Image (cartoon, coloured by chain):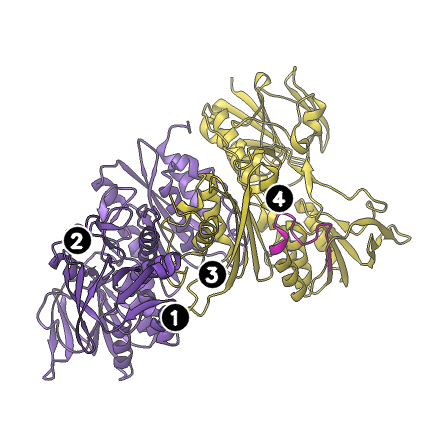
Chain colours: A yellow, B purple
């Protein structure tokens, strides 16, 4: 008889695990996926571009529908929320559209993802306050935008906050962004963060940093009408929350499974959470190893979720795949300013016990004499004694951000700046200077480190 | 008394060596540079874009003028051609604008660059046949183009040939490109080369591949009027040569110094050509080690020249810098098609003793649902037993080519495709799919290699 794989959560990680295992094992594996919502395998990261109007329709964000997965032999149950996990019995109880159902399993994959963190302040449950975590969230926000609001306040100035600010200002709204950090994007050091704030202001976004939201004022219908902060009250028609997410782990924790960093599930590199009881986990509900700091971290991101799901799927099929950890690469843009980072910032490098040197350069995206050359700033953080690259951050115009991949691979391979400056990166005037900006930054660090290359 | 450094050749490698050493040693080092031409530190790679009209003026291609170098304490002698090297006496004889002069040295850097290879056929010395190796070449060609020629034939379909074809067709000329290889760009495997040929034809360029030039017909004034090939005669008003270059090593060879691959100078990784007699060399006149094949190769390219010059400069100043070799990264574009390659192609991998598997994927430059998503094709070559990446080639639209850097760094670090697919490359919908095209290609190779990841 076929073994049964039960997957809880039908987005990136869960469906990757399900598909990869099913493709390898075919009829030898029965695969059931429980998904709370109506959609599977969608890009939550695309929601800001859907709201902005770049992406025409919800369907465009769905990589594979439940029907498509079913055609591949996967039994996808949408509208089905797992409520209880019995590890000893190997069973999950779920609320389905028609009542309650119990699903037995031989192998379980927990891919329950993340949920938005709402500010714990008065009025946070008011109407007119929108998250942008799920397609349903996006749909609700787009419906609200059709009522022609004039004013929006975005709470949180991280990736989602910045992306939603662009979306709202491009839709013609008066847009205020409120963030607690001194500059937008806390994962970018504040020297570069200042450039982001300047760009946002130039784009017509009212950026208010170092500001904490203390509550929401509502009208008689419990609809938000103002955001209250420690620096005054901001009237608004609606609010978008970009205040981060946390791992959704009630199901696992309720069954007595362990939780780790920020409440995320501490899986091993094969994706196993409980080897004795055949429990795996992947995606936005698990923690990862940061390869530079060596610490366990919680970095929910679609690209990790897909890879972790693939690893679990291969291992379910008898493989020995490993998720080797992350280096903290991330990127975004605000209007025409591209933003990217990888590895450790200055403070994180200190916290992790390194002796960091930070060096910043200005460069052009392509050979400076080409008409489409644009400015970019690169900051690198280097460990003085070992001369190893620890991190890099980029802020610049079109063509700047993708260079973060070179830094990410340098971190991955524990390269020194001496070696990085000598690598064979692509060169041609329409694409790069004769010293690529990555190598200009490495060379500047080598100069500052002083002693001749040895 | 200051030691004297004599540098022969004032472009990328020579001036990098001179500047780096002078900056480190100051008055303790007297630096004299002999340069045949009028310019120093210029971008020959930019000439096609100058001809195309993207770059307004010759001066834009000069990174640092002789005057600027002189202001930094370097005695630059332009219009000065070194004609004889006496290693035992430590002297170079040169033809100067006013006669002959002899320059003694304590340390010598040979940075004589490369010279175009002219087809060895009747009529090759006709007027109206232009190289594009030096700024003077570019100037002569631009003067000829002001005579409003209608027809141009470009001999050679490599980087320069393709770039000059774009320049000429954008200037409105009827442009024919003739190449001996079955597809344009011999460093790109012919499956992808077909895409390049198709793009060129779509751009209005008459591409004739598998064709060998056998001579040039001239008029009574010895001006070219047709290119004769083994596939017929092509009438033309002018000819541009993109038939490659060879190391310019008469001075070194004449003094009894060794030559290596394709006549280039076999320096060690510190840039030393003759340690006993204080002779260094760098740039387009030296050979390099290919880190993937392990072979010595001749790959003249500005980015290597700059790095090799820097290495020699640091070593002249008492450092122990090393040029660690190359992986064969190169890129270009033709109109809107971007082209990039690194490492070994299929045949080269076989020749180097590997057991190559080639895998090709189609992807999009950014998340497929974004409006600016464009198509790209990625081919990877992998060694079956070790699962190591051996090479990669990319052909695609805007945003495709720069990804070659990720492959270049993967080669540099001898990564397997299993590891490459799991690295932490940047992800955000405006920049990449959730599996970056680099990782899609690696994943496709992992699938094709078959056995589960171990």
Q: Which mark is residue B262?
A: 2
Front label number (3 vs 4): 4
Q: How far apart in space, not on screen, are marks 2 and 3 (Cα)?
A: 34 Å
Circle number at residue A365? 3
Mark 1 lies on a secondary structure that is helix
Q: Chain of mark 1?
A: B
Q: Identify the disc placed on residue B394.
A: none
Q: Residue at x 31, y 63 (%)?
A: B30
Q: Nearer the viewer, mark 1 or mark 2?
A: 1
Which circle's residue, 3 or 4, is located before the other in the chain? Answer: 4
Tell me residue A48's x, y (percent): 64, 53
User: What residue does disc 1 label?
Assistant: B71
- At mark 4, the secondary structure is helix
Are tags 3 and 1 found on a single chain?
no
Residue at the image point whose x is 69% and y is 27% from the top:
A251
The residue nearer to you, when weighing B119 against A248, is B119
Which residue in the protein does label 4 denote?
A347
Magenta stretch encompasses residue B212: no
Q: Disc 4 to disc 2, how far (Cα)?
A: 51 Å
Q: Are marks 1 and 2 on the same chain?
A: yes
Asked whether disc 3 touches disc 1, contact meaning CB atoms under 8 Å apart, the reply is no
Give the distance between the C-alpha atoms of the residues marked 3 and 1, in whole angstroms: 29 Å
């Amino acid at each position: 008889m076929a073994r049964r794989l039960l997957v809880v959560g039908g987005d990136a990680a869960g469906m990757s695990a399900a598909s990869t295992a099913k493709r390898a094992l075919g009829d030898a594996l029965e695969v059931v996926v429980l998904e709370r919502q109506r959609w599977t395998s969608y890009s939550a990261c695309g929601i800001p571009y859907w709201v902005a109007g770049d992406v025409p329709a919800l369907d465009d964000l769905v990589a594979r529908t439940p029907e498509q997965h079913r055609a591949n032999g996967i039994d996808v149950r949408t509208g089905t929320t797992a409520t209880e996990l019995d590890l000893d019995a190997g069973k999950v109880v779920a609320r389905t559209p028609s009542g309650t159902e119990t699903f037995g399993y031989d192998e379980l994959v927990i891919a329950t993802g993340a949920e938005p963190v709402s500010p714990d302040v008065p009025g946070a449950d008011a109407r007119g306050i929108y998250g942008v975590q799920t397609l349903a969230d996006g749909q609700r926000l787009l419906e609200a935008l059709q009522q022609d609001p004039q004013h929006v306040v975005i709470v949180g100035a991280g990736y989602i906050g910045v992306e939603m600010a662009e979306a709202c200002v491009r839709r013609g709204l008066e847009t205020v962004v409120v963030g607690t950090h001194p500059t937008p994007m806390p994962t970018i050091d504040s020297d570069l963060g200042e450039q982001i704030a300047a760009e946002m202001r130039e784009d017509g976004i009212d950026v208010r940093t170092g500001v904490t939201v203390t509550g929401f004022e509502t009208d008689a219908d419990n609809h938000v009408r103002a955001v209250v902060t420690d620096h005054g009250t901001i009237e608004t028609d609606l609010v978008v929350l970009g205040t981060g997410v946390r791992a959704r782990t009630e199901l696992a924790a309720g069954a007595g499974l362990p939780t780790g960093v920020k409440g995320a599930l501490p899986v091993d590199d094969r994706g196993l959470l409980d080897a004795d009881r055949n429990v795996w986990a992947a995606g936005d509900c698990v923690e990862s190893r940061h390869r530079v700091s060596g610490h366990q971290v919680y970095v929910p991101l679609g690209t990790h979720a897909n890879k972790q799901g693939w690893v679990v799927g291969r291992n379910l099929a008898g493989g020995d795949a490993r998720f080797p950890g992350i280096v903290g690469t991330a990127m975004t843009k605000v209007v025409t300013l591209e933003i990217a980072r990888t590895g450790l910032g200055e403070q994180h490098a200190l916290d992790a016990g390194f002796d960091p040197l930070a060096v910043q350069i200005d460069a052009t995206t392509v050979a400076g004499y080409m008409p489409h050359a644009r400015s970019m700033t690169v900051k690198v953080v280097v460990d003085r004694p070992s001369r190893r690259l620890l991190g890099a951050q980029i802020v610049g115009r079109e063509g700047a951000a993708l260079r973060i991949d070179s830094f990410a691979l340098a971190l991955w391979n524990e390269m020194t700046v001496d070696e990085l400056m000598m690598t064979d990166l692509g060169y041609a005037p329409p694409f790069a200077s004769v010293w690529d900006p990555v190598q200009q930054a490495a060379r500047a660090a080598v100069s500052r480190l002083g002693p001749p290359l040895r």
